[in-house]
C-alpha cells in the first residue's frame, strides 16, 4: 500500500521467510533480511525477490567461523551492514564502523570500497 521496503527477521526459519516473500515480490519494492545467518544456498532466492542481506556484530566474534564465511559469500549487490547500537547501549554494542571494518577485511577490500558499496546498496534498498 505504501510502496516501502520491508525489514524482516527470520531467526531460525529463514527458508520459510524467503518462500513467503515470493508472493510479495514486485508489490513490495525491496526486502532486508536482517540478521540473516543461514545457508548461502538461500542467497539466489533472496536476490530473486529484490532482497538485501545485512551483516551484523556477530562477524566480530572470532568463533563465528560459519557466519564469517556466509558474510564473504553474500553477493556484493545484496550486501548491507547493521548494528543494534543505540546511545543507551553504546558501551557494550559495537559500532557499524567496527562491523564494516571487519567485513571489509574478510572480503579483502578497503573500508572505503565497502562503504561506497553499502551506501549504493542502501540507496537502492530505500528507493
Image: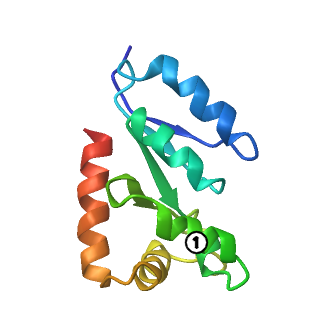
- Report helix, strand or loop for mark 1: helix
Which percent across, then down, holds residue 55? 52, 63
State the count of labels: 1
Quarter of the figure that contains the C terminus: top left
Which percent across, then down, holds residue 10? 67, 41
Asked whether residue 9 is in view, the answer is yes
Residue drawn at 57 percent across, 65 percent down: 70
Residue beneath disc 1: 69
Q: Is residue 68 left or right of residue 113?
A: right
Quarter of the figure that contains the N terminus: top left
Q: In the picture shown, does residue 52 fall above or below 27?
A: below
Residue drawn at 46 percent across, 19 percent down: 24
Q: Is residue 14 left or right of residue 52?
A: right
Residue drawn at 39 percent across, 58 percent down: 75
Q: In the picture shown, does residue 14 fall above or below 71?
A: above
The colour mode here is rainbow
Residue drawn at 58 percent across, 49 percent down: 41
Q: Residue furthest top?
A: 1
Nearer the observer, 107 or 96 = 107
Asked whether residue 57 is in view, the answer is no
Q: In the picture shown, does residue 61 fall above or below 75?
A: below
Which percent across, then down, holds residue 102? 48, 82
Nearer the observer, 23 or 102 = 23
Which percent across, then down, holds residue 9? 63, 43
Amino acid at each position: 500500500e505504501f510502496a516501502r521496503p520491508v525489514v524482516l527477521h527470520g531467526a531460525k526459519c529463514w527458508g520459510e521467510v524467503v518462500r513467503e516473500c515470493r508472493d510479495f515480490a514486485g508489490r513490495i519494492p525491496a526486502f532486508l533480511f536482517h540478521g540473516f545467518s543461514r545457508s548461502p544456498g538461500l542467497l539466489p532466492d533472496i536476490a530473486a525477490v529484490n532482497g538485501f542481506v545485512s551483516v551484523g556484530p556477530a562477524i566480530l566474534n572470532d568463533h563465528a567461523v560459519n557466519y564469517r564465511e556466509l558474510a564473504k559469500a553474500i553477493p556484493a549487490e545484496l550486501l548491507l551492514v547493521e548494528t543494534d547500537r543505540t546511545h543507551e547501549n553504546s558501551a557494550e554494542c559495537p559500532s557499524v564502523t567496527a562491523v564494516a571494518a571487519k567485513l571489509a577485511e574478510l572480503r579483502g577490500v578497503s573500508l572505503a570500497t565497502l562503504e561506497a558499496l553499502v551506501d549504493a546498496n542502501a540507496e537502492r534498498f530505500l528507493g
